[in-house]
Amino acid sequence: MPERSVAGRSIVTRRAIVDIVRTAVQSSYGVTGFSDPSFSRRLSRWIGLDRPGIELGAGDVLCLDLYIKVAYGMPVAEVARQVDSAVRYSLRRLVGVEVARMTIHVDGLGYQPTAVERAEAIGRESSELDEPVRVAAEELPGMDQAHKAPAEGETAPRRRRTR
């Protein structure tokens, strides 16, 4: 016979909630990062006391203020809706807490190059590096006839291997 369950209590820290919210926001499509709402928050983040972009008001109910940057060209309202949905779902699923109030502040637009633009830039750099540099053998000092590159149409002389 199964034992009766005993009612208990679980405690979730503010830091755990902030980490869950941060992960949900960063995984949302169109968010390029967090921003700092004030100079004092920027200063405390620089010292290492705070993380940017999330203000958590936990009392009887959970209240969130999120300060995010949205990717340039993305529909801001749609990104905010997606962030809201992702955060509420994550907190409900992982902690079992409902969010009473969530305010999303879009603090700016961020530009991040797309994967295609990055690939094109890498392709340009590698093609510049792959171009052979041709130097005439006569221009290289200390090079004898055996080490000179063959002219166009000629084949390179075979070298004997010494044992």
Image (cartoon, rainbow, N blue to C red):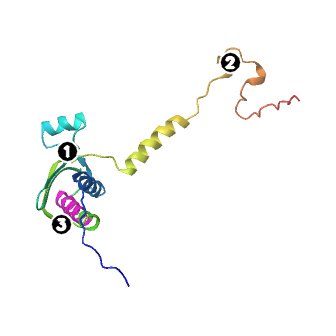
**Magenta stretch holds residue 86:** yes
* Range of residues picked out in magenta: 75-89
* Measured Cα–Cα span from mark 2 to mark 3: 79 Å
Q: Which of marks 1 and 3 is in front?
A: 3
Residue 54 screen position, x and y as percent: 19, 50
Label 1 residue SS: loop
| N-term-proximal mark, 1 vs 3 | 1
| N-term-proximal mark, 2 vs 3 | 3
Residue placed most toward the observer, 108 or 83 = 83
Give the amino acid type for the residue marked by disc 3 in the picture: Glu
Dot label at residue 88: none
Give the amino acid type for the residue marked by disc 2 in the picture: Glu
- By secondary structure, the bulk of the magenta-drawn segment is best described as helix
Dot label at residue 98: 3
Q: Is residue 22 found left or right of 141 in the rendered image? A: left
Label 2 residue SS: helix
| N-term-proximal mark, 1 vs 2 | 1
* Measured Cα–Cα span from mark 1 to mark 3: 24 Å
Give the amino acid type for the residue marked by disc 1 in the picture: Ser
Residue topped by disc 2: 138
Residues at discs 1 and 3 in contact (Cβ within 8 Å)? no
Residue placed most toward the observer, 112 or 99 = 99
* Measured Cα–Cα span from mark 1 to mark 2: 61 Å
Residue placed most toward the observer, 120 or 97 = 97
Residue 89 screen position, x and y as percent: 25, 66
Residue at 43% over, 47% down:
119
Where is the C terminus found, in terms of image quarters?
Answer: top right
User: Mark 3 Cα within 10 Å, few/some/many (few <14, many 20+)?
Assistant: some
Q: Nearer the viewer, mark 1 or mark 2?
A: 1
Residue topped by disc 1: 35
